Image (cartoon, rainbow, N blue to C red):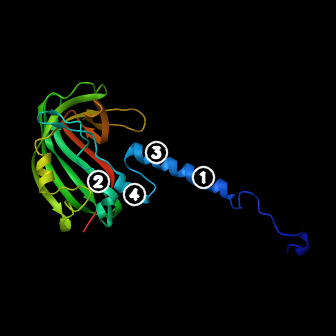
């Protein structure tokens, strides 16, 4: 038992409260770091999961049927989470038969419920076929193609969340995707932990970007990719 005459006990600095000025400085630095990270990646922010979903931007720019658009991907999120109460994960995945001269497959734009741990609540599939040569410059790619989004089909739409979500895939948005074009490629080895990946051409920056994990086998020409773009909100 501590002797009362010994005076009040002084906690070591690591257990005590920080001075008010230090706490304010720490909060300012932390807030600035979060804001910077959210701006750079378009995925995170100081508002927690909902803020991350609201800050999420589109993916790599696409090429329109007439040429480069310079616009970001079509899955940009609505402000402040679009007012939707539920949190999920949005992404793109697909399969194709591909090699150095051909590409014939599909891409699915999807939303997984329950913060990405649930089941699909929205899946919209687009045919994806080669229409020409992709822009040059992907030095890590085994092959590249200019592909065009074709016929679309909604395979999953739980309670209409394809439209009522940050995906915003209503009829008009789906129609807008059909006919657009994008440069796509496969990189067998990017080094380190990256492994093999899908590459897409970003017309805004005129560069090739990593957009998802991917596999491809030369013997059967089977190409497969999955790209989780990040958190997104959905209704109803």
Q: Which residue is mark 4?
A: 51
On screen, residue 230 above or below 64: below
* Residue 135 in the image, given as x and y percentages of width and height: 21, 27
Instruction: Give the Cα distance between marks 4 and 2.
Output: 11 Å
Q: Is residue 176 above or below residue 67?
A: below
Q: Depth check: 121 or 214 in front? A: 121
In the picture of the structure, the residue carrying the numbered disc 2 is 77
Kindly indicate whether the residue at mark 1 contacts the one at mark 4 (C-beta within 8 angstroms): no
| Distance Cα–Cα, label 1 vs label 2 | 30 Å
Spatial CA span between label 4 and label 3: 14 Å
Residue at 31% x, 56% y: name it: 79
Q: Which residue is mark 3?
A: 36
The residue that mark 1 highlights is 26
Pick whichever of labels 4 and 2 is earlier in the sequence.
4
| Picture quadrant where residue 166 is located | bottom left
Q: In the rendered structure, are the residues bearing label 4 and label 2 in contact, judged by CB atoms less than 8 Å apart?
A: no
Q: Residues within 10 Å of mark 4 (few under 14, many from 20)?
A: many
Query: Residue at image x 43%, y 53%?
Result: 45
Please give left or right for residue 171 compared with residue 5 in the image.
left
Q: Quadrant of the C terminus?
A: bottom left
In 3D space, how far apart are the residues under numbered discs 3 and 1 (Cα atoms)? 15 Å
Q: Earlier in the sequence, mark 2 or mark 3?
A: 3
Instruction: Give the farthest residue toward the right.
Output: 5
The first of marks 3 and 1 along the sequence is: 1
């Amino acid at each position: 038992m501590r002797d009362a005459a010994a005076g009040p006990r002084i906690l070591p600095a690591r257990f005590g409260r920080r001075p008010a000025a230090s706490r304010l400085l720490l909060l300012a630095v932390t807030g600035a770091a979060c804001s910077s990270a959210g701006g750079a990646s378009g995925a995170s922010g100081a508002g927690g999961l909902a803020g991350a979903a609201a800050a999420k931007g589109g993916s790599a720019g696409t090429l329109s049927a007439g040429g480069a658009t310079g616009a970001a991907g079509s899955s940009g999120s609505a402000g402040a989470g679009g007012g939707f109460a539920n949190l999920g994960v949005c992404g793109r995945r697909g399969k194709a038969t591909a090699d150095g001269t051909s590409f014939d497959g599909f891409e699915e734009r999807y939303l997984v419920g329950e913060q990405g741990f649930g089941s699909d609540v929205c899946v919209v599939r687009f045919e994806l076929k080669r229409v020409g040569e992709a822009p040059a410059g992907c030095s890590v790619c085994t092959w590249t193609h200019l592909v065009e989004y074709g016929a679309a089909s909604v395979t999953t739409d739980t309670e209409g969340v394809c439209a009522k979500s940050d995906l915003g895939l209503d009829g008009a948005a789906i129609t807008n995707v059909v006919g657009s074009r994008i440069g796509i490629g496969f990189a067998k080895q990017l080094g380190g932990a990256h492994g093999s990946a899908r590459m897409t051409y970003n017309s805004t920056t005129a560069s090739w970007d990593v957009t998802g994990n991917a596999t491809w086998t030369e013997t059967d020409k089977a190409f497969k990719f999955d790209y989780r773009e990040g958190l997104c909100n959905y209704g109803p």
